[in-house]
C-alpha cells in the first residue's frame, strides 16, 4: 500500500486528498446535555455492548464523524471485526470482505473511509480508482497478507505451470495482480470448482485451503500463510467449552485450523456466521473468530448468550473513533495503488464479483 504523498513523489501526478478538499478544523468534542438527548436513541441500540461509562467519551466522536461524513460526501465501510461504536454507530456499510468488496464497487460517494485493514482499503481503491480512499491508520496491516508477495506468486506460477491461482482477498494488490481470480471465505469453494480443473492453487491461507479441500474433489495446493487470530484457537479449547456446557453451540471461521473446524457445529465466513445465529437463535453460542464480532452480533440478537473467546486482531484495533475523525478532518491517510498493478489486480477482484453475480 502506498500513501498519496509517496505516490506523488514517484509519479508527480497524484494530488493528495488533503489538497483537493476544503480544509477543516477539528470540531469541539464536548458531551453536552443536548448531545446526550440527541444521541440517546443510538445508545439505546448498543447499550448492552457499550458500557454507560464509555458512552460520554464515544458520543462526541460519533456525532462529529456522522456530521463530517455529510460535509465530505463520504461513506464509512466497516468490517465485522470493528468494535461496536464503529460498526453500529458510524458505518454506512458493514460486512465481511466479500460484502465490502461488492459495496465498494457501487458506492455513490466522493470519499470512502475504510475501517478495516490495508488490503481492504486497497481493494476499495482498485474498484473505485477515481474516488478518494482513506484508511484511518496506515499501519493497520494483516499477518496473512504479509505472508506472501507478488514474487512468491510468480514463482508458484513457474513451479506449477497451467495450474489456476486463486488468491484470498486478504492479500496485497501486488499479489492479486499476479493471480487469476480472488476469493473470500464465503465463495472459495465455488471459485475453486469454477475452473473445472483437477488442481488449483488456493493461497495464501493454508487452513482455509485445507478446509475447502475437504468439500471438493479438486486437489488444492496450499501456501503456509495464517491469520494470527484464528491460528491460536485449538480443538482442545473447543472440547473444554462442550465439557463445561454440553448444550453450547460452536461456530467457527474457516481460517481456523482444520481440527478446530471439525469440532464446530457450523463453519462459515463472518457473514455466514452472523446469518446462522440470526436464523437459528441458539441459547448459548461460541463464535470462534475475532472477539469484537460477538459484540456486534449481540446487538441484533439480544436473546442469544455469547461466550466470548477473546482473541483480538491487533491490526483491526488500530482503527478508532479518534483516527476516523482525524481521517475525515485532515483527509488522511490516502490509499493509492500503482496503476500498472491496479489494472491486473482489479481484474482478479472483478472476476470474483462477476462470478458471484
Image (cartoon, rainbow, N blue to C red):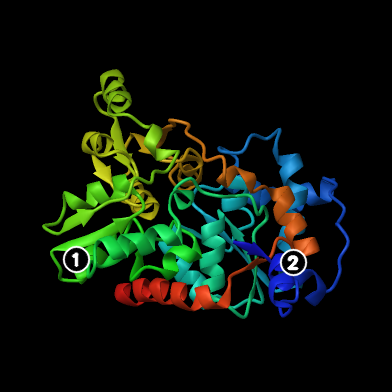
Q: Quadrant of the C terminus?
A: bottom left
Residue 183 visible in the snapshot: no
- Could you tell me which residue is drawn at 23 percent across and 63 percent down? 192
Secondary element type, mark 1: helix
Q: Pick the residue in front: 120 or 196.
A: 196
Relative height, residue 101 to residue 149 (above, below): below
- Could you tell me which residue is drawn at 26 percent across and 24 percent down? 239
CB atoms of marks 2 and 1 within 8 Å: no
Secondary element type, mark 2: helix
**Disc 2 versus disc 1: nearer the observer:** 2
Q: Residues within 10 Å of mark 1 (few under 14, many from 20)?
A: some
Relative height, residue 72 to residue 145 (above, below): below
Mark on residue 123? none
Please give left or right for residue 24 compared with residue 17 in the image.
Answer: right
Q: Position of residue 236 (x, y in %)?
A: 28, 23
Relative height, residue 15 to residue 99 (above, below): below
Q: Quadrant of the N terminus?
A: bottom right
- Could you tell me which residue is drawn at 71 percent across and 65 percent down? 6
Please give left or right for residue 292 compared with residue 54 in the image.
Answer: left
Write down the residue under mark 2: 5
Q: Pick the residue in front: 239 or 169.
A: 169
Mark on residue 193? 1
Residue 307 visible in the snapshot: yes
Q: Position of residue 326 (x, y in %)?
A: 77, 56
Real-space Cα distance between discs 2 and 1? 42 Å
Q: Earlier in the sequence, mark 2 or mark 1?
A: 2
- Could you tell me which residue is drawn at 55 percent across and 48 percent down? 82
Q: Residues within 10 Å of mark 2 (few under 14, many from 20)?
A: some
Amino acid at each position: 500500500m502506498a500513501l498519496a504523498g509517496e505516490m506523488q513523489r514517484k509519479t508527480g501526478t497524484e494530488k493528495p486528498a488533503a489538497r483537493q478538499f476544503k480544509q477543516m478544523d477539528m470540531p469541539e468534542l464536548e458531551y453536552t446535555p443536548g448531545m446526550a438527548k440527541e444521541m440517546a436513541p443510538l445508545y439505546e441500540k448498543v447499550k448492552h455492548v457499550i458500557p454507560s461509562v464509555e458512552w460520554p467519551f464515544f458520543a462526541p466522536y460519533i456525532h462529529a464523524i456522522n456530521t463530517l461524513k455529510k460535509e465530505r460526501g463520504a461513506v464509512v465501510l466497516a468490517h465485522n471485526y470493528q468494535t461496536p461504536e464503529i460498526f453500529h454507530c458510524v458505518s454506512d456499510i458493514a460486512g465481511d470482505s466479500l460484502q465490502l468488496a461488492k459495496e465498494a464497487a457501487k458506492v455513490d460517494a466522493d470519499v470512502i473511509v475504510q475501517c478495516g485493514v490495508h488490503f481492504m482499503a486497497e481493494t476499495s481503491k482498485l474498484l473505485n480508482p477515481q474516488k478518494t480512499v482513506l484508511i484511518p491508520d496506515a499501519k493497520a496491516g494483516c499477518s496473512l497478507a504479509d505472508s506472501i508477495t507478488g514474487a512468491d506468486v510468480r514463482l508458484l506460477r513457474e513451479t506449477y505451470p497451467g495450474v489456476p491461482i486463486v488468491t484470498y482477498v486478504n492479500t496485497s494488490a501486488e499479489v492479486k495482480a499476479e493471480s487469476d481470480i480472488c476469493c473470500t471465505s464465503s465463495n472459495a469453494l465455488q471459485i475453486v470448482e469454477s475452473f473445472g480443473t483437477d488442481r488449483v492453487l488456493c493461497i495464501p491461507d493454508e487452513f482455509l485451503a485445507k478446509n475447502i479441500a475437504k468439500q471438493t474433489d479438486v486437489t488444492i495446493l496450499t501456501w503456509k500463510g495464517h491469520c494470527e487470530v484464528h491460528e491460536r484457537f485449538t480443538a482442545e479449547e473447543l472440547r473444554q467449552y462442550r465439557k463445561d456446557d454440553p448444550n453450547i453451540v460452536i461456530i467457527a471461521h474457516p481460517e481456523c485450523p482444520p481440527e478446530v473446524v471439525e469440532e464446530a457445529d457450523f463453519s462459515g465466513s463472518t457473514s455466514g456466521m452472523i446469518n446462522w445465529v440470526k436464523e437459528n437463535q441458539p441459547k448459548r453460542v461460541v463464535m470462534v473468530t475475532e472477539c469484537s464480532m460477538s459484540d456486534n452480533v449481540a446487538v441484533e440478537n439480544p436473546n442469544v448468550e455469547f461466550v466470548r473467546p477473546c482473541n483480538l486482531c491487533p491490526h483491526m484495533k488500530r482503527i478508532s473513533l479518534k483516527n476516523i475523525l482525524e481521517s475525515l478532518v485532515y483527509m488522511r491517510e490516502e490509499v493509492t495503488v500503482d496503476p500498472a498493478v491496479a489494472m491486473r489486480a482489479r481484474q482478479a477482484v472483478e472476476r470474483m464479483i462477476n462470478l458471484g453475480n
